[in-house]
Amino acid sequence: MTMTTKLFFRMLACTLVAISFCLGTTPGFAQKLEDPDKLISQSEIELASPPVTPGKRTMPTAAQVQAGSKSKAKEDAQDAQVYNDVKTLDSGDRSMPKTEGPVIDLEKSVQRALDANPQLQAAQAAIVSAEQGRRKAMADFGFVGTVSYGYSNNNVLYNTHTSTMTMYDPITSSSSSLTFRDPKWSRDQEWALSFDITQPLFTGFRLLSTYQKAALSKDSATAQLTQTELDLILAVQQAFLSLLKGRSDVKSNQDSVTRLESQFQVTQAFYDVGLRPRLDVLQAEADLATAESQLLIAQNDVATQTAQLNSLLNVPLEQSTNYVGELTYLPFTLSVDTCLAEAYKYRPDLYIALKSVQMAEKDAKIALSPAYPQVNGAFNYTFVGDNPDLTYDEAEISAPQSWTLSVQAQWQAWDWGSTYFNYRAAKENVKQLQAELANTRLNAGFSVKAAHLSIQDAAKRIGVARKGLEAAKEGYRMAVARYQAQVGTNTEVLDAQSRVSTAESDLNQALADYEVSIASIYYAMGKKNMTLTPQ
């Protein structure tokens, strides 16, 4: 067979392959589009393609074929190995792992967290503790009763017995007398049982202020429970929405890998018959590897978000939980003024800050209480006896009983300004907390405004992203058709595929941002919206 005959058969084979591509009948070369039922007509290809100059696309000459046959065989072997490696990497299941167990949507997830999360248990324990403190402050208004029982032994020395001795001096014929006293110990032992009652009558408003502060502390603890619930609801909703976005990203990356795999196969087939350079194969291969990497990252993000959600719901991390839901768009109709009014009315942190100011005012009154007289009443009743059973050894003596009733007023007249300085420090603390309350109110307003702006921004981006995705998909279909008709380049297909992936990612991000903003604005208003439906 002559060289001319070989060249003729090569040109005939290339022509048949090109025709089969145009007709879409070559096995393994059909491009998987988004909708397989929609096919681009030849007129669409002609409109989307620039005019082709006759003779511009020429087949390789015999000299070029003979010179590049050896290098092409080597490249074919390398490409076959690369293709096998890619297929090996892709042989695993790229779909989301199927989970078993009860179906848990967003509302059930939030409710589960409210029922089982330890943060709520801690907040509830704080309320119980505050209630006990209030009861203790109430009990301090009452009298205090004490009972005492004891023994005492008193020894007293008496010189009651005296004796006189007279002495006579024969020299002086005088006499003198000496008097002696005999010491006598008196031992007195006593057993006593005493009942004492003390009642504070006036403490400079200390008891009253302490009780009022304890009651405010309970109110603050109750509001703190509400704040903890709002924090937990927001955390669960953000984690749930991040999980849904992650799943959407996985689906987008799976579609991207599928498109790139198909393009890689088509490019490889074109290269095998000499219609495309090896550079196209390498570009398709590189983009496919990048898409595979992005898919793995997205799948890992989904696993991480699932673990975080399990942690918030107090579910074992290794448990397979079937979370279900999808990113949706529901219009938010509340105005920013309405949201601000709701926030100033319902936000628990504003209520907590207000209670902190009121408690600080009670502390100032408590600090000033030593400057007032302190009045207390006391009552005592005592039984006394020689024996532990409060009886006397002499039968004719009965155990004595005594009682006393007293009222005592005490006033600290001078303490070198200690009470005054303590009171001034407490008043300055009140001013500090009032300023913090004003700052908390400003931050609350900003949070509402920022969340409202985020909702508007995300809503606009959703519309733009949807239009961009439609255009990107149509552009990809046109690029694939042009490439299969041999009027487009591989770079155009890869760029179009990249634009589709970017548009899908932008739409997923916009939908996730929108719903996260909805959750944030309800959190900023201090309202519980477990399903994120408009209220």
Image: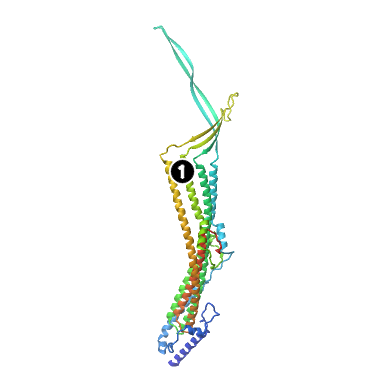
Give the x, y percent position of residue 226.
53, 55
- Of 377 and 252, the residue lying toward us: 377
Residue at (49% x, 37% y) in the render: 374
Q: Quadrant of the image for the C terminus?
A: bottom right
Quadrant of the snapshot with the N terminus: bottom left
> Which residue is drawn at the image coordinates 41% and 40% (left, top)?
417
Q: Quadrant of residue 380?
A: top right
Residue depicted at 49% across the width and 82% down the height: 481
Q: Is residue 122 visible?
A: no
Disc 1 packing (10 Å; few <14; some 14–19; many ≥20): many
Q: Nearer the viewer, residue 348 or 221?
A: 348
Q: Is mark 1 on a helix, strand or loop?
A: helix
The image position of residue 323, as x and y in percent, is 56, 65
In the rendered image, which residue does mark 1 sit on?
367
> Which amino acid, by three-letter code, is at mark 1?
Ala
Rendered position, 461 above or below 158? below
Report whether residue 455 is seen.
yes
Residue 309 x, y percent position in the rendering = 53, 62
In the displayed structure, 349 sits above or below 51; it is above
Q: Provide residue 42's location: percent of width, then percent of height.
A: 51, 85
For residue 34, above or below residue 520: below
Q: Which of 258 and 462 is in front in this view?
A: 462
